[in-house]
Amino acid sequence: MNYPHDDLALHPLRWHADGSAIEVIDQTRLPHREELRRLSDRNAVAQAIRSMVVRGAPLIGACAAWGLVFALREDPSDAALQASVRILAETRPTAVNLGWALARMLARVQGIAPALREQAAVEEAIQICLEDIEQNRRIGEHGLAILRRLHHELHRPLRVLTHCNAGWLATLRWGTALAPLYLAQQAGLPIEVWVDETRPRNQGALTAWELGRAGIAHTVIVDNAGGHLMQHGQVDLVIVGADRVTATGDVCNKIGTYLKALAARDCSVPFYAAVPSPSIDWQVRDGLREIPIEERHAQEVAGVSGLDASGAVGTLRLFPAHSRCANPAFDVTPSRLVDGIITEHGVYQASAEGLAPLGALLALAARR
Amino acid sequence: MNYPHDDLALHPLRWHADGSAIEVIDQTRLPHREELRRLSDRNAVAQAIRSMVVRGAPLIGACAAWGLVFALREDPSDAALQASVRILAETRPTAVNLGWALARMLARVQGIAPALREQAAVEEAIQICLEDIEQNRRIGEHGLAILRRLHHELHRPLRVLTHCNAGWLATLRWGTALAPLYLAQQAGLPIEVWVDETRPRNQGALTAWELGRAGIAHTVIVDNAGGHLMQHGQVDLVIVGADRVTATGDVCNKIGTYLKALAARDCSVPFYAAVPSPSIDWQVRDGLREIPIEERHAQEVAGVSGLDASGAVGTLRLFPAHSRCANPAFDVTPSRLVDGIITEHGVYQASAEGLAPLGALLALAARR
């Protein structure tokens, strides 16, 4: 397993140096059970993505890349390559990074002789992982600058509120929204984190777990509590991740993000979204009208999972059987409520004008 | 059991005509189990209040009144009367209605001969129950006028969002926030209700249960979802109850109410609080600064109760054992976000000026 000079405990995916297998933390068992899954063939990887053993766009993309490595070891032919790309791409159809990672792997291996493909694929998969780590570290650096300014102003531990899980568990390391917090910890900047529970899937439990693993002080609150805390000066900054940011700076993220952004604005608390630049959708200008919101299964609302008194993971039904439940999974926070978009290239204003320089930078890089 | 000419199923408390006992729905078992508890002595009533078998300020007050009835049957002496008032008053120290109901019972019986006290107490307890029902019905009528106007404008079923439980389960009948909805149903006005889960104690389950019992269409959502629904025109009106309303119209209610009020204002959705006039605290002018917010046990956040696969009521732990939880139980919605306070005397603007006529009316009534 790799990642020299780094804390091995803070990666949700590690690979064998010879590229024969990866190990992932089974996120369906967190935070109650810490179990590693060894994956060494394509179907096992596909199943791990489907069943959400791995989650988070960057991590899913990287896993799929490794799935292709294992497929090419079995059969490096053109036909098998195409079939495996298709199978892996269909594991989570809406994850953008999945298609991106597979397209990149395909581009790397399809022009070379089948016998050389496995080695090239291993190199590319490692590259994808390392680039994600570097990208997140840079998001963290730019976010850290914001934290430093705030700390310089307030002269006390900073209290940061976050929603859902956009931490190292969802990426290869550091996370997006949480990257600035991990770098702040390394820099000796005192921070405390308010962790939104994030019903219905309670990803706050993952955030609490990974912050605990890293030794960062944190307090879990229900999704209802953040506004009250902001009213009483208990929150200095809100940082969230995002599934998608529009060209105009609207932020599509886990359901409930909009409510926290409203409270942040009402209480003059800065509100930032941290995303890698590929998560900016330059085609969308009006997030509220243009982004379709996934309606997930009502069962996620009607029930909840946790640890019972005997230490077993169980599920409970919360509401009367006859009561209908609705489960919109994401919402859109209008750019007017967002103080900035933190990316690996810097912090940009959440507006078409504010993001334009980033668009130009990316276009330039693409032309090189 | 009483309540002639009414639906017996929609009362959380019924009394025997001879005053010998009351029956209450055990609210600690809802929505999963529907169990009645027969209470016929003071200590059983005190324990039911303490253990939240009964909850909701008006219902607690009425139960305490009946507890005093049962105490006076056992021993109508002055000493026993004083002792029972003290014991019942201490069951839930923060409930205003509890003290109010006991003071009223005491005033009724202390001036008369011990032998006559029991009968007088029965009459007063029944009077307290019937007055609560009438008060809530009048809140419902005033709220119904708002619903009628909205329906006249929109010409389609009205979608109303509510938070926590301020329905018939919390009162003697009708509820406060839900009273307009029950009267709308009786009037044939089509309504659908969005029921906030209301973590951490999930009182939305009680709301879903009582709406279901009354046959009102409803959909349970997580507390994160309401803002998104309002952004997309899926909510026509928000009505909540309140634990306390200040003289200036600030609304202190279950944690999370403030976030919904922010979204309602941002999306131009009318936001109302429905309360009996005794819940207006004329001494408090700044709800945010002056109302202390109860911090309840972290265990309410860390765990959750529900029905397991075998049909038994169980509890699960949701977060890592090392993670701290915080649990502020209420928040204050500033009056600027509130479109009106619905009371039994009418609908008033949420401001000092708006509520002044109500204050004058109540002062006049008190002088009579």
Image: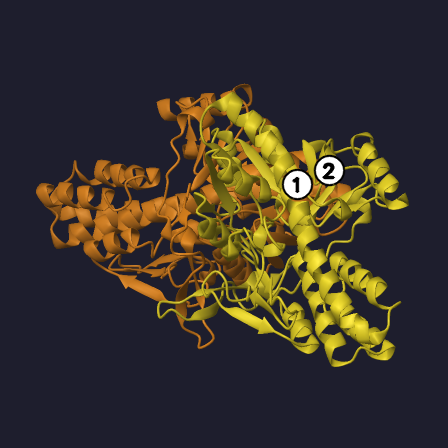
Chain colours: A orange, B yellow
Q: Are marks 2 and 1 in contact (CB under 8 Å)?
A: yes
Dividing the image into 4 quarters, which one contains the N terminus of chain B? bottom right
Residue at x 76%, y 41% (from the top left corner): A153
Dividing the image into 4 quarters, which one contains the C terminus of chain B? top right
Q: Residues within 10 Å of mark 1 (few under 14, many from 20)?
A: many
Q: Amino acid at mark 2?
A: His
Q: Label 2's element?
A: loop
**Numbered label tally:** 2
Is A309 on the left or on the right of A259, as rendered? left
Front residue of B220 and B50: B50
- Residue bearing mark 2: B345
Residue at x 16%, y 39% (from the top left corner): A112
Looking at the image, residue A123 lies above or below residue B154: below
Looking at the image, residue B265 lies above or below residue B57: above
Residue furthest toward the bottom? B74
- Residue bearing mark 1: B138
